[in-house]
Amino acid sequence: MKSVWLLGVSLLTFCSASFAQNSTAYTPSELALFADESLKQSIGQLEAGVPIKLLQSKQDVSQIELEMWRKDKGLGRIWYNQFSKHITDAVMDKNFMQNNPTFEVLEKKEDPLTGLVWQKVKLQAWVKNSKFTDSLTDFWANAEQTFKTECSVCHKQRDTKMHDANEWVAVFNGMVGFTDMDEPTRKQVLRYLQMHASDSQPKAAK
């Protein structure tokens, strides 16, 4: 992996794809998170289809920046894509969250439905280089096709707008046991349903 310059703009090359420095990319699959460039201190795991900011690339590793939401309750290990929506972006290690984690709190907001306070947080971390993408078009298309194929055998096909993002968790978990989906596929399809739910934000589901 290397950095190149074009028309005065730094471009970072990640596995044959070039991104401008500080540009947004998406994870193609689950990806381990580390606190250090040597990838020795594990701090958590990113889910597939998660937006990240690419800061720099060094050989086989990249430094990234995350902006996500977490509940300000307990360890708050699950980090979410949007405020008050259970769309999982990352699961942080217990040890990391127990030992003064170095993330920045950007905003605090109370969920009027539950009374829980959520924090918008920012964290810089390191990952092993992967085939990052600048669009989720293929990711969503694959998930949509799987959903249509696997989840219309026992009942009429549901529209993604029939439920909000949080409702889809219970609805999908009630259906998925009757399918042949493996764990990564289940997560991809659930993310597709949540990001295209009745309360979805257009810009979030690129």
Image (tube, rainbow, N blue to C red):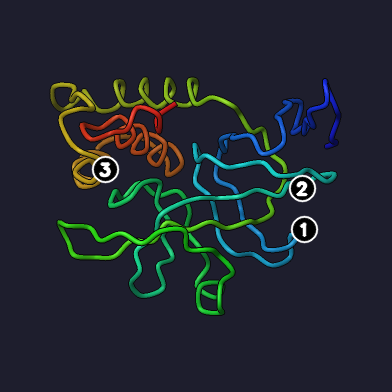
Q: Residues within 10 Å of mark 2 (few under 14, many from 20)?
A: some
Q: How far from the left and from the top, in percent, is residue 83?
A: 32, 50
Question: Mark 1 or mark 2, which is nearer the start of the sequence?
Answer: 1
- Residue pictured at 42% horizontal, 44% vertical: 183
Q: Is residue 63 above or below residue 35?
A: above
**Distance from label 2 to label 3 (Cα)?**
37 Å
Q: Residues within 10 Å of mark 3 (few under 14, many from 20)?
A: few
Q: Is residue 17 above or below residue 82?
A: above
Amino acid type for the residue under numbered disc 2: Val
> Which quadrant would residue 77 be assigned to in this image?
bottom left
Q: Secondary structure at mark 2?
A: strand
Nearer to us in this view, 2 or 171: 2
Amino acid type for the residue under numbered disc 1: Glu
Q: How far from the left and from the top, in percent, is residue 204?
A: 40, 33
- Residue pictured at 63% horizontal, 56% vertical: 124
- Residue pictured at 19% horizontal, 65% vertical: 115
Nearer to us in this view, 65 or 139: 65
Q: Is residue 162 left or right of residue 118?
A: left
Amino acid type for the residue under numbered disc 3: Gly
Image quadrant holding the N terminus, namely: top right
Image quadrant holding the C terminus, namely: top left
- Which residue carries the number 1 mark? 37
Q: Secondary structure at mark 1?
A: loop
Q: Are marks 2 and 1 in contact (CB under 8 Å)?
A: yes
Question: Mark 3 or mark 2, which is nearer the start of the sequence?
Answer: 2
**Distance from label 1 to label 3 (Cα)?**
39 Å
- Which residue carries the number 3 mark? 177
Q: Residues within 10 Å of mark 1 (few under 14, many from 20)?
A: some
Q: Secondary structure at mark 3?
A: loop
- Which residue carries the number 2 mark? 61
Q: Is residue 173 left or right of residue 87?
A: left
